[in-house]
Image: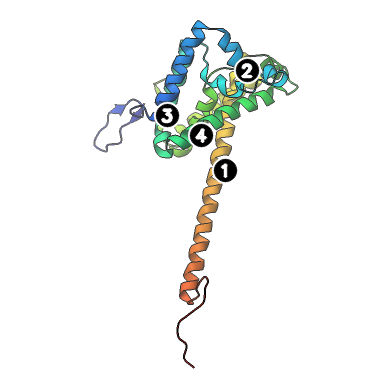
Amino acid sequence: MRRTASPYASSFSFGPGPLTSAMKGLIGANVLIFFAQALKPVLTTTFGLEPFAVIEHFWIWQLGTYMFLHGGVFHILFNMLALWMFGAELERIWGTRYFLKFYFVTGIGAGILTVLFSLLPFGVSQQVYGSDVIGASGAIYGLLLAYALYFPDRPIYMYLVFPIPAKYFVILYGAISLFMAVSGGGGGVAHFAHLGGLLVGYLYLKGRRMRLAAEIQYQFARWRINRARRRFDVHPGGRDDRPRYH
């Protein structure tokens, strides 16, 4: 829920507007697979992320397929609502191609980090090692981080009641996931994926910004060189065929 952009209106609008192309595809795929899970429960054990299966049997496809599986109606409902709320506006800014790239990089990256966390010599890590991790939360937490970076002061209504600026909202949820993961609360399973999505999203966007900054610096240096050439009548190459007088 967010305030309308019009300076003359004081009402509130729910959501970021109509579904974008990626939203339609991702939400549609998640819903279809959710119904397939209900008909074939074996899909959850085969395509959910189980670190043991990835390490011991090399079922690496689980690093991507777990993102489309959910454990119940409320699980998929809230995940798809969050995907639409945070993802639609980012897709309009980035474009569909880059949005999908970011979504899958953060989701798969969260899965990889979950597997790596499960190898640590701690009790909660060993619990994750033999558990099934399902849901799009890893990628959605990456979107939440990106949303907070782009719109840090925009209010997000926690439980649709309490307005919290996006930058504090992501810190709060990150802290909750960290506490739950370390303490083993709620099984400590999906919380590692949440933290992985936040970390991968941050590193990916930071790398993009560094590349953008390098490109800006390169173009500025190129402009200065061309400006100096024009100032001193220096040509980039070739022979000067103008007539010379002695």
Say whether disc 2 or disc 4 marks the residue closer to the N-terminus: 4
Q: Are marks 4 and 1 in contact (CB under 8 Å)?
A: no
Rendered image: mark on residue 41 = none
Say whether disc 3 or disc 2 marks the residue closer to the N-terminus: 3
* Residue 147 shown left or right of residue 13 in the figure: right
Element class at badge 4: helix
> In front: mark 3 or mark 1?
3
| Residue found at x 46% / y 34% | 99
Front-most of residues 78 and 161: 78
Quadrant containing the N terminus in the rendered view: top left
> In front: mark 2 or mark 4?
4
Say whether disc 2 or disc 1 marks the residue closer to the N-terminus: 2
> What percent of the width, then of the height, locates residue 181?
63, 21
| Residue found at x 54% / y 43% | 208
Residue designated by label 2: 188
Q: Amino acid at mark 2?
A: Gly
Residue designated by label 1: 207
Front-most of residues 130 and 33: 33
Q: Amino acid at mark 1?
A: Gly
Q: Amino acid at mark 4?
A: Lys
Farthest residue to the bottom: give it. 246
> What percent of the width, then of the height, locates residue 182?
65, 21
Q: Are marks 3 and 2 in contact (CB under 8 Å)?
A: no
Residue designated by label 4: 101
> Could you say which quadrant of the image residue 111 lies in?
top right
Q: Residues within 10 Å of mark 2 (few under 14, many from 20)?
A: many
Q: Is residue 157 visible?
A: no
Q: Amino acid at mark 3?
A: Ala
Rendered image: mark on residue 22 = 3
Between the residue at mark 2 and the residue at mark 4, the CA separation in whole angstroms equals 27 Å
